[in-house]
Amino acid sequence: MASGEGKTRDGTRVEYRTPDRKGALLLSPLMVAWGFFSLVRVGLGHFSGFVDVLGLALGVLAPFLLNTSLGKTVLDDRGIHAWRPLWRRTVRWQDVLSITTEEKSSQGSGAHRVRVRRHKGGALWLPAPYVELRATKAEMDRFAAQAAEITTRWRARTAADGS
């Protein structure tokens, strides 16, 4: 089974996780510890300049890093559940208008992501699966297969419901 993907025994539930999850789980506590140490130093009047400013900034950025890297997408009989620590969204299969893969980038970096458009308007970028723009062919192929599986499940579920 590919990294970032998990299936239940009966095959009705599929879970995709972000590929950088482990790195963020290791890096974030270090960022928080450095930020806390810098906050204590500043509070005690031992401000040392750049090192403490950087520590405070990293301590503030750690929750955002965790929110991005701990995201997951769960597919089940009810629909698509996009989950991040700070928010959760569910889209029922019947509410899905289309599922596409699109490039989402800014300032030279970005990723290929899955986008779910709803009948009632609006779209949802799924937290996982995704692949960086500079990914290898094997990573791109795995992403394409995962995106195709999401689309296949949506079509099968809406055909079974008659929607």
Image (tube, grey):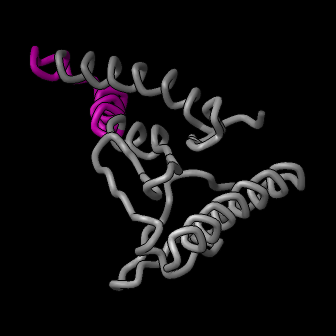
The stretch in magenta equals 41-61
The image quadrant that residue 124 belongs to is bottom left
Q: Residue at x 73, y 63 (%)?
A: 148
Q: Residue at x 16, y 23 (%)?
A: 42
**Relative to 150, residue 37 above or below:** above
Instruction: Return the residue found at the far right.
Output: 137
State the quadrant of the N terminus. Answer: top right
Q: Confirm whether residue 111 shows in the render.
A: no
Depth check, front residue: 69 or 12: 12
Q: Residue at x 46, y 44 (%)?
A: 71
**Relative to 48, residue 19 above or below:** below
* Residue 89: percent from left, percent from top: 34, 57
Depth check, front residue: 157 or 66: 157
The image quadrant that residue 67 belongs to is top left
Please count the marks in the image.
0
Q: Going by the image, does 83 lie left or right of 59?
A: right
Q: Is the magenta region chiefly helix, strand or loop?
A: helix
Q: Going by the image, does 140 lie left or right of 116?
A: right
Q: Confirm whether residue 14 shows in the render.
A: yes
* Residue 34: percent from left, percent from top: 35, 20
Depth check, front residue: 154 or 125: 154
Is 102 covered by the magenta stretch?
no
* Residue 63: percent from left, percent from top: 32, 37
Q: Residue at x 49, y 44 (%)?
A: 72
**Relative to 74, residue 94 above or below:** below
